[in-house]
Amino acid sequence: MVNIQTRKTTDELASLVKKLDRMVDNAGEKKGAATKHAFLVYLTNNPDVAEKELEAFAEKHKIKNIPLTIFDGVAGPRNYNIAKDAEVTVMMWKKQEVKVNQAFASDKLDKEAVRKVLRDAKGHLKNGRA
């Protein structure tokens, strides 16, 4: 399972999510199941505005395989311990345990960071660790 927690939608986030969306689709096809292996959570203090923003984000970037959800509160779920200065946090889970946790401060989710996350996600999903 790949979990993206974000406090902002950016072009770089869109790049990551679009590529991960295709990767998840391919993983599902290979297994012959429609199981979702990734999801995005928008951390916000204004869920009504965020909902419209996520709908537009999904439509604009043609996101089809990754559920986009909202969490009411920018701190995120208490047990996740998301860094206060992280704009985007990517976690990869195996059997309810976080195996990968990558946090990116504002403007740090650049093209190279997106490539690294995708490499990690590909290995994580390919090896059945999701």
Image (cartoon, helix red, strand yellow):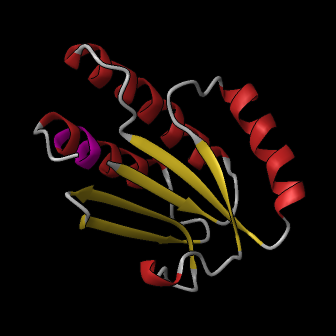
Q: In this picture, is 86 found above or below 90?
A: below
From the viewer's perspective, is residue 60 above or below residue 39? above
Q: Residue at x 81, y 49 (%)?
A: 51
Residue 99 visible in the current orientation: no
Q: Is residue 64 left or right of residue 60?
A: left
Please say if 23 is above or below 5: above
Q: How many marks?
A: 0
Q: Position of residue 80 (x, y in %)?
A: 44, 77
Q: Which residues are magenta?
A: 119-123
The quarter holding residue 56 reads top right
In the image, is residue 122 part of the stretch drawn in magenta? yes
Image position, residue 2 (x, y; %): 36, 49
Depth order, front residue of 65/83: 65
Query: Residue at image x 58%, y 48%?
Result: 13
Which residue is painted at 53% across and 31% down in the image? 18
In the rendered view, tell whether residue 84 sits above or below residue 104. below
Q: Name the magenta segment's main secondary structure.
A: helix
Q: Quadrant of residue 20?
A: top left
Asked if the magenta segment contains residue 50, the reply would be no
Q: Position of residue 92 (x, y in %)?
A: 30, 57
**Residue closest to the far left:** 127
Q: Is residue 127 left or right of residue 14?
A: left
> Is residue 30 among the parts visible in the rendering?
yes
Question: Which residue corresponds to the image point at 17% horizontal and 42% vertical from the top-left?
Answer: 123
